[in-house]
Image (cartoon, rainbow, N blue to C red):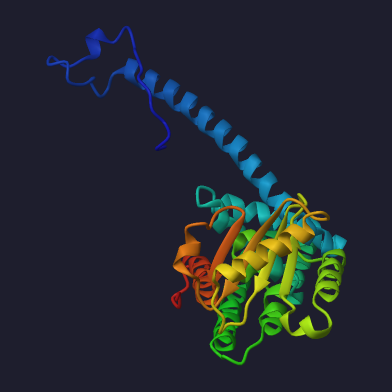
């Protein structure tokens, strides 16, 4: 309603106005007719705008999650699509990134057997009486909330363990690499739908083996190349959690991108280390990002915390 504004000019109500022209008489038949007309027109306009914007938002989020939907068994896809629509409708008006965070957790939950059991009960109830179906749908909704909450809390546990890993000076690049590769949600909602396939892995391995072999093997970088559905790429270089990011590290990362751009383009760069030279942050933009492991974990906690808060969880961090 905050988006509705306007001015209405009405003729024929001169005799229905108070003596001071400050208001219209409450029992005015003409005013009731105007109210009914305006109510109808405004509702139609709002419903039209909502339907248009909702469908556009739904289409964007569905596209972002197409890869994950295709990996689900066929009998689960329809329910997954329905669950995504319900989340979008429930959180309509919130930040799109936050909605995508919830959608990602819902898809995680759909992979659980107990979730499918309730979905199957809903399907079977469709053949029974109305009350049975209503009960099954209610159970579905309750389980959906519970599963999202459980998954979010599990993610907090993962973040606790990750922080222990990055706070250990003996941790290697390869060790944090394997964690992030299988848990891209840690990098933020935009990365939850990115993936590293066999082609990307092979290309990076071939590049590093060719350019960093023999005596240079010890300097071999730890790179992760991710792709989205639009074939836009992000090259992530993991530094040791005890290693800071400076000008030299930036220059080397740019060279990695230059060497790989011939096969994969366009490509963004993300560098993650212990901390970042303040001068580098001035260059941070769409094409290159400099992050500390602590900042990444903090952002991930905020996203998970928002999900728990939206669900009304009393243990929100």
Nearer-the-camera pick, 244 or 17:
244
Q: The N terminus appears in which quarter of the rendering?
A: top left
Looking at the image, is 264 positioned above or below residue 149?
above
Residue at the front extreme, as displayed: 215
Residue 129 visible? The answer is no
Q: Position of residue 178 (x, y in %)?
A: 72, 79
Q: Is residue 10 left or right of residue 145?
A: left
Nearer-the-camera pick, 102 or 36:
102
Image quadrant where residue 32 sits: top left
Q: The C terminus appears in which quarter of the rendering?
A: bottom left
Image quadrant where residue 28 sits: top left
Q: Is residue 212 left or right of residue 154?
A: right
Q: Is residue 204 left or right of residue 20?
A: right
What residue is shown at x 87% (from left), y 60% (from top)? 74
Residue 279 visible? The answer is yes
Nearer-the-camera pick, 58 or 40:
58
What residue is shown at x 59% (from left), y 50% (from top)? 89
Looking at the image, is 112 positioned above or below residue 134?
below
Residue at the left extreme, as displayed: 20
Image quadrant where residue 110 sits: bottom right
Q: Position of residue 290 (x, y in %)?
A: 55, 65
What residue is shown at x 83% (from left), y 80% (from top)? 213
What residue is shown at x 60% (from left), y 77% (from top)? 155
Q: Position of residue 54 (x, y in %)?
A: 61, 42
Q: How many marks?
A: 0
Q: Position of residue 115 (x, y in %)?
A: 72, 71
């Amino acid at each position: 309603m905050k988006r509705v504004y306007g001015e209405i000019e009405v003729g024929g109500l001169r005799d229905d106005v108070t003596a001071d022209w400050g208001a219209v008489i409450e029992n005015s038949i003409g005013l009731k007719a105007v109210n009914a007309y305006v109510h109808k027109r405004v509702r139609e306009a709002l419903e039209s705008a909502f339907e248009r914007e909702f469908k556009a938002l739904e289409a964007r989020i569905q596209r972002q999650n197409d890869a994950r939907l295709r990996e689900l068994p066929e009998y689960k896809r329809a329910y997954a699509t329905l669950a995504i629509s319900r989340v979008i409708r429930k959180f309509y008006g919130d930040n799109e990134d936050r909605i995508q965070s919830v959608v990602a957790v819902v898809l995680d939950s759909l992979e659980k057997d107990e979730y499918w059991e309730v979905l199957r009960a809903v399907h079977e109830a469709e053949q029974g009486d109305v009350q049975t179906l209503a009960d099954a749908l209610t159970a579905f909704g309750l389980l959906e909330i519970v599963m999202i909450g459980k998954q979010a809390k599990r993610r907090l546990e993962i973040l606790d363990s990750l922080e222990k890993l990055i706070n250990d000076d003996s941790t290697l690049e390869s060790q944090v690499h394997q964690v992030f590769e299988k848990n891209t949600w840690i990098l933020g909602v935009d990365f939850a739908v990115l993936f590293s396939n066999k082609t990307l892995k092979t290309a990076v391995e071939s590049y590093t083996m060719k350019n960093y072999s023999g005596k240079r093997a010890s300097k071999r970088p730890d790179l992760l190349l991710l792709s989205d559905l639009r074939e836009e790429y992000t090259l992530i270089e993991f530094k040791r959690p005890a290693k800071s990011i400076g000008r030299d590290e930036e220059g080397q990362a740019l060279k990695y991108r230059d060497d790989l751009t011939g096969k994969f383009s366009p490509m963004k760069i993300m560098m993650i280390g212990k901390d970042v030279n303040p001068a580098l942050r001035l260059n941070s933009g769409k094409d290159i990002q400099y992050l500390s492991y602590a900042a990444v974990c903090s952002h991930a906690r905020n996203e998970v915390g928002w999900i728990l808060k939206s669900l009304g969880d009393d243990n929100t961090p």
